[in-house]
Image (spheres, helix red, strand yellow):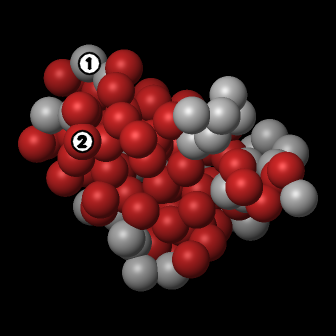
Amino acid sequence: MPQNEDKSEHSSTELSPRRRRLLFRATHRGTKETDLMVGGFVGRHIASFSEAELDELEAVLEMLDVDLADWLSGRRPVPPDVMTPMLERMARECSMPGAGVPEAARRT
């Protein structure tokens, strides 16, 4: 496997059923923008999340796509009443340059 290849794809079969289900939900949100931001974040971190973080992730995945896309892209601030450590971590990582861009597209 090339060193730069996205590890989330090859390791998904090694994940527990719960982690595989959450990864699938994160990458099949309904809008491409949210699939890339949320799915990319989850793909990079799903293997290392604790059970408590998985609970937090499940709550984030229940949120509407339009809201997540706006919050994670910075178009709107995350309202304090829905801010969680997981959502804050996602927003911080998604605000970085190149966030949401698939690894293969960054190499070309």
Q: Residues within 10 Å of mark 1 (few under 14, many from 20)?
A: few
Residue ranking furthest to the left: 17
Q: CA distance from mark 2 to mark 1?
A: 18 Å
Frontmost residue, 83 versus 24: 24
Q: Residue furthest front?
A: 1
Task: Characterize the local packing of mark 2: few (<14), some (14-19) or many (20 or more) Cα atoms within 10 angstroms.
Answer: few
Q: In percent of the image, x 45 and y 73: which residue is there?
A: 65
Amino acid type at image mark 2: Thr
Q: Quadrant of residue 88?
A: top right
Disc 1 secondary structure class:
loop
Q: Measuring from the top left, give residue 18's x and y in whole percent.
A: 13, 41
Quadrant in the picture for the N terminus: top right
Place of residue 44 in the rendered image (x, y in percent of width and height, measured from the top left): 51, 35
Pointer 1: what residue? 50
Residue annotated with mark 2? 13
SS under mark 2: helix
Amino acid on which disc 1 is placed? Ser
Mark carried by residue 82: none
Place residue 29 in its image quadrant: bottom left
Q: Is residue 16 left or right of residue 8?
A: left
Q: Quadrant of the C terminus?
A: bottom right
- Would residue 14 be found to the left or right of residue 74 on screen? left
Do we see residue 13 in this rendering? yes
* Picture coordinates of residue 102, whole percent (x, y): 68, 56
Front of the two marks 2 and 1? 2
Asked if 88 appears above or below 53 in the picture, the reply is below
Asked whether, in this view, residue 45 is left or right of residue 91, the answer is left
